[in-house]
Amino acid sequence: AKIYVKNIAEAFCAADNEGCDSYKANAAAYTTKLDALEGEVKAAIQSIPEAKRVVITSHDAFGYFEHEYGLTFLAPQGISTDSEPSAADVAKLVEQVKQDKAAAIFVENITNPRLIEQIAGETGIKVGGTLYSDALSGSDGPASTYIDMMHNNITQIKGAILGS
């Protein structure tokens, strides 16, 4: 996100040199918020025992979260939401969930919850809430900005895994 902020500020400065100081100040202020957010997310993940850092989502949209924060995400649909997984794919995931002892399962705001509810039923894992991946919520929802989305997601994940 910090790279986006930097690039956007630079593009605005290139298009409007007179407003450049304002764009740079806004970018610096937002980057400070992003730094604080990163600290909050890392602290939340650290509070989860390593053995419980396995969760299931509808599709594989959380690779950045895995890479940056050390959670493992299992997903029946892979990266694309355009196609349905086969019965064999679902059975394989159910078996993997049982072996890896996934701690939580989540629906996503952009996908049909039916598949996740089926996997939850077959594994006995309670659906832990809704994560936002490829789209924000409406302005009155829990993920109307990037920072709100990250807060929502980590709150949902931590709460479902730790029961809080």
Image (cartoon, grey):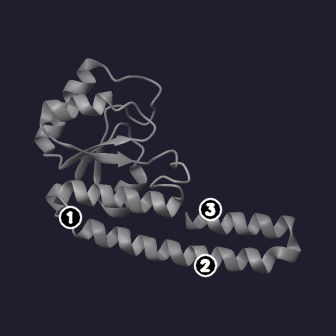
Q: Which mark is residue 29?
A: 2
Image depth: mark 3 or mark 1 in front: 1
Query: Who is closer to the viewer here, 88 or 145?
Result: 145
| Mark 1: amino acid | Ile
Q: Which element type, helix, strand or loop, lies under badge 1?
A: loop
Q: Which element type, helix, strand or loop, lies under badge 2?
A: helix
Q: Earlier in the sequence, mark 2 or mark 3?
A: 3
Q: Which quarter of the image is occupied by the N terminus?
A: bottom right
Q: Which mark is residue 106?
A: none
Residue 67: percent from the left, percent from the top? Answer: 37, 57
Q: CA distance from mark 2 to mark 3?
A: 14 Å
- Could you tell me which residue is drawn at 30 percent across and 47 percent down? 129
Q: Earlier in the sequence, mark 1 or mark 2?
A: 2
- Could you tell me which residue is drawn at 20 percent across and 56 percent down? 161
Q: Which mark is residue 4?
A: 3
Residue 111: percent from the left, percent from the top? Answer: 42, 34
- Could you tell me which residue is drawn at 16 percent across and 41 percent down? 125
Q: Which mark is residue 48?
A: 1
Q: 101 above or below 161?
A: above
| Mark 3: amino acid | Tyr
- Could you tell me which residue is drawn at 19 percent across and 25 percent down? 91
Q: Is residue 46 left or right of residue 141?
A: left
Q: CA distance from mark 3 to mark 1?
A: 29 Å
Q: Residues within 10 Å of mark 2 (few under 14, many from 20)?
A: few
Q: Residues within 10 Å of mark 1 (few under 14, many from 20)?
A: some
